[in-house]
Amino acid sequence: MAFVQSTVERLDRPSTYYDKSNKRNREEVQHREDPLKDATTLYVGNLSFYTTEEQIHELFSKCGEIKRLVMGLDRFAKTPCGFCFVEYYTHEDALDCMKYVGGTKLDERIVRTDLDPGFKEGRQYGRGKSGGQVRDEYREDYDAGRGGYGRSLQSASEMGAEYD
Amino acid sequence: MVDRGGRYEREGRESRDRGGYRAERPQHFKKRRYQDDDDRDYRQQRPRYEDPMVRLRKDVLAIAESPLIKVEDSIRSIAKSLSAHWDHEAIRKGFVTLIKTLVVEQPFKIPFVAAIVLCANAQKHEIGKLVLDEFAAQLQEYLDQCEWRNFKLTLRFMGSISCMLDGEGVAKVLTDLADLTGDLAAEGGSSGLSEELSYVILITMPYIITAAPGGITEEFLTGLIERLEGMQISAPIEPLLSPYTGPNAPYPAMNTTTLLLNALKQEATDGFKFEILARPWEPFHAELEAATKHFFPSITKPTSLEGGTIFPKLYFSVFQGAQYETVPAATSITSAILRDAIGDTIGLLDFNRIACARFLIDVDCYFAPNAFVKRATPFDKISEVPEGKSTWKPEDICVDAIFTNIFQLPQPEHKLVYYHATLTEVCKLAPQAVAPSLGRAIRYLYRNLESMDVELRYRFIDWFAHHLSNFGYTWKWTEWIVDLELSKVHPKRSFIQEALEKEIRLSFANRVKSTLPEEYSGLVPEDKEKELPDFKFEVDDIAFPEEGKQLLNLIRQKAPNEEVDTLMNAITEAANNKGLPDPSKYARDMYMTCICHIGAKSLSHVLSCIERCKDKLTQLGQESNQAQRQIVGTVMRYWHEQPGIGANVIDKLLNYSILTPLSVIEWVILDAGRDALPRGHAWEMVNTTTRKVVSRTRNLAAARSVPDLPEDQMTMVEQGHDVAKAEQAELFRVVMESLGKYADGTVPPPEGTTEDDAVWLKWWAASWLRALKRQSDIEEAEEAMRVSGATADGAMEEDTAAGEVAENAMDEEEA
């Protein structure tokens, strides 16, 4: 049957993040097969630094058995920095997770889920200047679950401290 | 929420942005505003042009959504624009596709869409004709594919446009369906399927009668109802599907199809009123009378009906027998109609739970005006509703419908977490209205824990903890303080304990503790707050403490296997010399404890440790079934304060085939014994394990029926399936036998058990037995169906063979 647009938006579609990261090769991308077609992995964001693998497992296994769970780590400190990859055995479980778990709370924070083409070694590390995620570099709000203020703000105020 | 613009609008917007002056000087890039800014900007804007299809789509999708817009005005304006643009193919195609999708995605709106089509048909009869033809083709497709829900909704739509139909209309389809049902019943075919068909016929009736009073005679419907009543056969599995059992069950088990049938019979004597349904076409009565009528296209009966096992659906409610009737009585036709429509909305919109929640909150927009009390009317204000007015709370009706899904046996349509998430969204959208309803629902379920099926009890715990985790763990725990005095094996006391355990798994002990009154502190002991459990060889008075620490170091430092083996052999030797019974168990317990301790930091840690020591673990498990049970025990002993983590580790060991499913089940039922039966993790372990076994057998069975499988592979699959089937049978046998002995008292309770506790322990065993018997019966029935399906094909081949032989014989005679 031909594709029919739903009367209501679907929650199991990938965000635009993946498209954006390929801006340079967009034309090439259009010819290639959709890499998320059979995706079984999810990127999970906005976790607290203190959320454990067991907590993630407890919530995410409600959508199906988890094959692998990779915690996102600070590149230098090797401590959790607020994201992870959850891999299921089936594509369907991953879609269900987008529909039923994305946007709900874990450890009292709303978590964000996104379909992901699959974990590769190295992706578990934060890509921010100071080792964590980029979003935690310049954050201006105070977030106790993610190390307080953004790191560059923190270091700026520390630099000023010597003049006190 | 609703994507009313869709693709068209988005494309349109892009092209607008690309053209004109705005691209050269975007407003937001300017540093200052000048006085003439406003003027210029408005002048520079190109005139807005909206594609008529985009507009149409937006309007049709929004139909009846807003209580502020008179729905008859919307209907009139859509119908008008539709007939004005009907010459455009894009409009014709777009509209028909849109409403075909709308009908099977947003069933609440069916009567309103029907009204649009009726009105448009009165203006331009080609519209009615095309819609009818397209829907008939679609209906046929759903029928051939046995997609019953979509079939039902498409048929409902066609029934709702009955007043533009000539001749028998939908009645013919209903008669045909009844014939099919009759054939099924006569053949002794699937009772689930014949029930489903009866249900589809019955639930369509109210919509037809409402849409075209007189178009279909009441005698015809009454006759049909009687005919279907004669065909009802109840499924053998049905007694095991009731949510409550025992003398204190809040209500008896009620089959929803039977309820609907009886409600319709009652309605027949009252003259088929169906006051709950909306009648949006009524204001257009005069116009519709004069409109062209069309013949209903013919629908062909399918030659064969397929579609797996369909289980009977049983009534479930959390608001039965309340002081005020906030949901329609179970036996009423209103209850059946609402539950059907809301149930379908929930079932269909799983791809957007937020949209689904919005529809549920707005449910009062889509039925007869004044069918419900005002939204968010508090429960104690219901008493002030004047006599003769509705006391039905829309929030209660929706909450009830979601719980009906969560508590559906054997399984709801979607994963349970979908319903959790939808309840969360409903609460977020209208907290003032929904939270009190939810509170009453929780209390109702809690009150009836002593009669609730054990699997449903676990689902209740799972939902409750998950729900609270989304709302800061706030609950009026004070009202259950009295129940803390109850024995630990009492279902209510056990519920409290297990709900807290689940909360801790989603959060952490200190956080959960901070949300509880002082009286509960005993339920979250200090030990649960420890980051790592103790390594028993360091603290306990235990055999071979030094060796334990040595082994831990060896494994941690990744010492060569020989060193580990030497140490472990020495321990067994020493135990033997001391004359200890089962001397090899010490080293085994020590090894597994060390792995738990090394991996205690996180799931990945324990996984990588298991991976590394896989061979040794496999070897330890292979010694005997008893050895595997001991390994399970060691893990659960190590994690006794956080049994959920222990259960997870066991599950991984099962995946590595270090443990067999049977050993896990035997450990729970025989080793942990009946004291473990009230524990949530115990049920979880048994449930996950049996489901794994069952799904493996099913997969192998499915692999058998792959066409054109090479013979050697077929033999392998066949053998694999036989082994799996035997293993599964053995597993269920062990479970039932042991639980049976607990339940009937053949095995007396441990000494020192109080009389009351003994009664509860028997109760636990009996309810576990029922739940597992249900699983086992379902699997047996499935397998029987697969076998009968296979032999039916085989038999047919034999028949033809026999026929050929007979023919040959006849030929010979002639010769």
Image: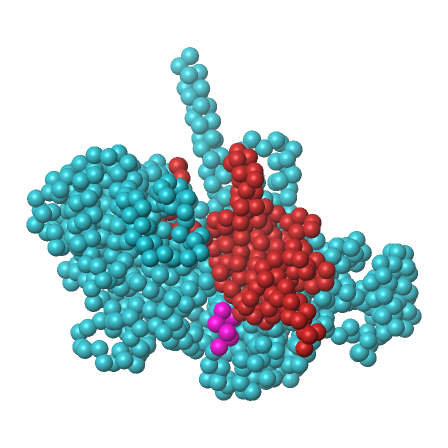
Q: Position of residue B732 (x, y in %)?
A: 59, 58
Considering depth in this image, is A29 or B341 the residue closer to the camera? A29
Q: Using the rendered view, name the quadrant where residue B353 is placed.
A: bottom left
Q: Position of residue B225 (x, y in %)?
A: 23, 53
Q: Using the rendered view, name the quadrant where residue B670 is placed.
A: bottom right
Q: Taking A27 as reference, is B712 left or right?
A: right
Q: Is residue B471 magenta?
A: yes
> The N terminus of chain B is located in which quarter?
bottom left
Colour for chain B in the figure: cyan
| Residue under the image location 23 percent in, 52 percent down | B112
Considering depth in this image, is A154 or B84 the residue closer to the camera? A154
How are the colours assigned in the image? by chain
Q: Residue furthest front?
A: B35
| Residue under the image location 25 percent in, 81 percent down | B383
The stretch of residues the image draws in magenta is B468-474
Q: Taking B348 as reference, is B528 left or right?
A: right
Colour for chain A in the figure: red
Q: In this rendering, is residue B290 above or below A158?
A: above
> The C terminus of chain B is located in which quarter?
top left
Q: Position of residue B111 (x, y in %)?
A: 23, 52
